[in-house]
Image (tube, rainbow, N blue to C red):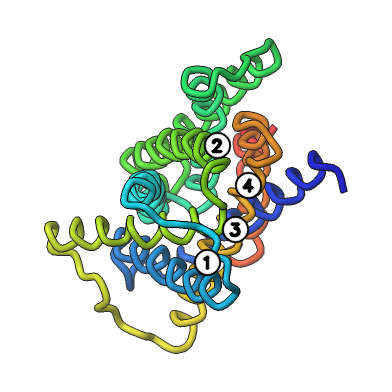
Amino acid sequence: MSDNLKGWFYILTTVFFFSTLEVVTKPYSGIFNPLQLTFLRFLFGGLILLIYIVTTGKLKNYKLTFKNLLIMGSIGSLNSLIAMSFLQLSVKFSNASTAAILISANPIFVVFLAWIFLKEEINFRKILSIIIGLVGIALIITSNTNGDTVIGLIFGSLSALSFGMYTVLVKKFVSKIPSNIFVTFSFLVSSIFFFIFLKILNIPTFNFEIEGFGVIWMLIYLSLGITGIAYITFFKAFQYLDASKGSFTFLLKPGIAMILSYIFYLMYPMLKRFLVLL
């Protein structure tokens, strides 16, 4: 398999897992504080990955330094503490499909940020894609869909911006630090910052009601699938693809999420949503 095909395989695997996040967490938005749920999935995901890299010996060949831990923790915080928290808040205050569409607009920001920080070229097709993407966001904001709120739309847009910056920084540093190690310690170190942040805001960390096995299976899937496997494939993808090209694949995410929302919650997509997907 060529390097290009490997890159696309990894990024499509990532997009599939990411597309299920809003649909999986929506039924439990009343049980967890959005920030609490984000903290738990990254902490548990990091612990699962730590067990994996220790038992498989992948950690033996890499020397951890305080500088690298700080880099991984800072970049991880941009994702978990900022981008994903905004996403969970968007899910809470808007429809799952709306949140999925907004976070998928991150390629719009990646193109500019990659041009500034990675010196990637901006060509006509990328500019045209940005313009079409902005039209899609405008259609969402003006759709007045039941279940969507202004604050939910703002949180979703902020999530896209911060995740775009995270994508660019991942591309910048993933070539210097093995992806498995980067993912694991970016989750664990950022979870320390996240824990302190939650305590300052007096938000519960490990206290929540377990209403049947559904909650447990949801946390396992979030930690192992969406936060574990998906981020490993995400990091590996950018070893073969440039940041802007890989991020544009996220435009598939809202379509998958919309189909899942219809299957599980019978959320019928409006005509404007189809225009947004196009």
Q: Residue, x 51% and y 29% (percent of image)? A: 137
Nearer the N terminus, badge 4 or badge 2? 2
**Residue 93: x and y, percent?**
35, 51
Check if mark 1's residue and mark 3's residue have beta carbons within 8 Å. no
**Residue 184: x and y, percent?**
47, 61
Nearer the N terminus, badge 3 or badge 2? 2
Asked if residue 210 lies left or right of residue 119, the reply is: left
Which tag is nearer the camera, tag 3 or tag 4?
3
Q: Residue, x 36% and y 85% (percent of image)? A: 210
Q: Label 1 vs label 3: CA separation?
A: 23 Å
Secondary element type, mark 2: helix
- Quarter residue 38 falls in: bottom left
Towards the viewer: 255 or 235 = 235
Which tag is nearer the camera, tag 1 or tag 3?
1
Which tag is nearer the camera, tag 1 or tag 4?
1
Callout 3 crowding tier (Cα within 10 Å): few <14, some 14–19, many ≥20: many
Callout 1 crowding tier (Cα within 10 Å): few <14, some 14–19, many ≥20: few
Q: Residue, x 70% and y 51% (percent of image)? A: 10
Task: Name the amino acid type tagged 1.
Answer: Lys
Check if mark 1's residue and mark 4's residue have beta carbons within 8 Å. no
Residue farthest toward the bottom in the current orientation of the protein: 212
Secondary element type, mark 4: helix
The numbered dot on residue 230 is 3
Question: What residue does disc 4 label?
Answer: 253
Task: Name the amino acid type tagged 3.
Answer: Ala
Question: What residue does disc 2 label?
Answer: 171
Q: Is residue 275 above or below residue 47?
A: above
Towards the viewer: 174 or 255 = 174
